[in-house]
Amino acid sequence: KELPAHLVAFSGAMAAAFTAWLLPMLVFELCPVARAGDTVRIPSMEIASGVHMPVLSIGTGGLESQAASTIVINWLGLGAYGIDTALIYRNQQAVGAAINASGVPRKDLFITTKIPGCMQAKASIESDLKQLGVDYIDLLLIHFPGPISARCPSTWGVLEDYHAKGVLKSIGVSNFQTKDLEAILNAAKVKPAVNQIEHNILHHDDATIAFCQKHNIKVEAYSPLGRGNHSGDITDNKAIAAAHNVSTYQVALRWILQHGHIVTFQSSSQAHQAADADVFGFALSAAELAALDGLHNASAASTSTLFV
């Protein structure tokens, strides 16, 4: 069943706005670092009862179908199975085709996708399933609380219904702040497993993170290298990277992981993907973590109003 015409128009308009918002982060290609072997090993984290999510997933946001397909093929070729997409990216058919062509068993994959805001949830979920060519989704997120955030509790109820049927193995949100989360929790039978938010050395919403931790909602970082200001280009990060003989990009990702969060990142090159997934062979000291924690700069935050 195709999406209704008004939802297609809504998704198209939101996609255009989202792409404009996303472009600043796409210019940062992740830096390759030599590694032995051609297979990555990525640990998982339990995000809900019986649901284990890789702590690193590859993102496909804002990219053309061909690029999204290449990204997924390269990532799966490394033996990494966490994939992040969304209805609003308008490339899920290519992602689904790449998954199908890979030969990787569905049970070994972890697919995260998203529905655009708190409206037309059922139609969006059905479209996600159809475009990806799957009969269940590992993690489905409400992509953002707008444009009508008052509808989010009822939208959450639709996600809970699909969760009860086993079609959505886990459910969560993205770009939700404390007030948005409170509205969901007040009505929820199943609490959000994950809140995917912009999170990097230069920008972190500590109030939202603290609220998530209090309610056992896992934080997943997108834009882990920053947007507009590059997390790899700061003096402290370079010094720490040199001390561990790793790249500044690896330090930026390790900082997030070592705080107990999950990460989705983007890179089209398989060599770059492998390098940036190689962040489990070193650990930052308490002093290094503290130094990086202190680099937060509110002016580096996105000024987009798309998700306000």
Image (cartoon, rainbow, N blue to C red):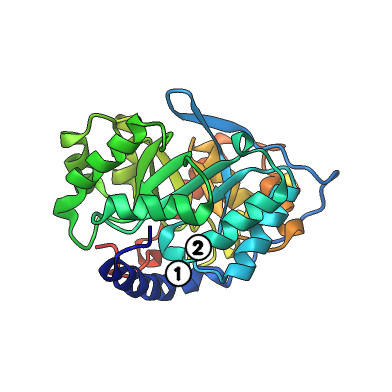
Residue 165 percent location from the top left of the image: 36, 31
Q: Residues within 10 Å of mark 1 (few under 14, many from 20)?
A: some
Image quadrant in which the C terminus is located: bottom left
Residue 205 percent location from the top left of the image: 34, 50
Residue 232 versus residue 153: which sits nearer the camera? 153
Q: Is residue 48 above or below residue 98?
A: above
Q: Is there a contact, CB below 8 Å, between mark 1 and mark 2?
A: yes
**Callout 1 amino acid:** Leu
Q: On residue 165, which mark appears?
A: none
Image quadrant in which the N terminus is located: bottom left
Q: Where does label 1 land, which residue? A: 22
Count of numbered tags: 2
53 left or right of 127 in image:
right
Residue visible at 33% across and 30% down? 164
Q: Where does label 2 land, which residue? A: 61
The answer to whether residue 246 is visible is no
Q: In the displayed image of the protein, which residue is found farthest to the front?
A: 1
Residue 221 versus residue 47: which sits nearer the camera? 47
Q: State the CA–CA distance, disc 1 to disc 2.
A: 8 Å
Residue 298 versus residue 140: which sits nearer the camera? 140
| Mark with earlier residue (1, 2) | 1
Q: Secondary structure at mark 2?
A: loop
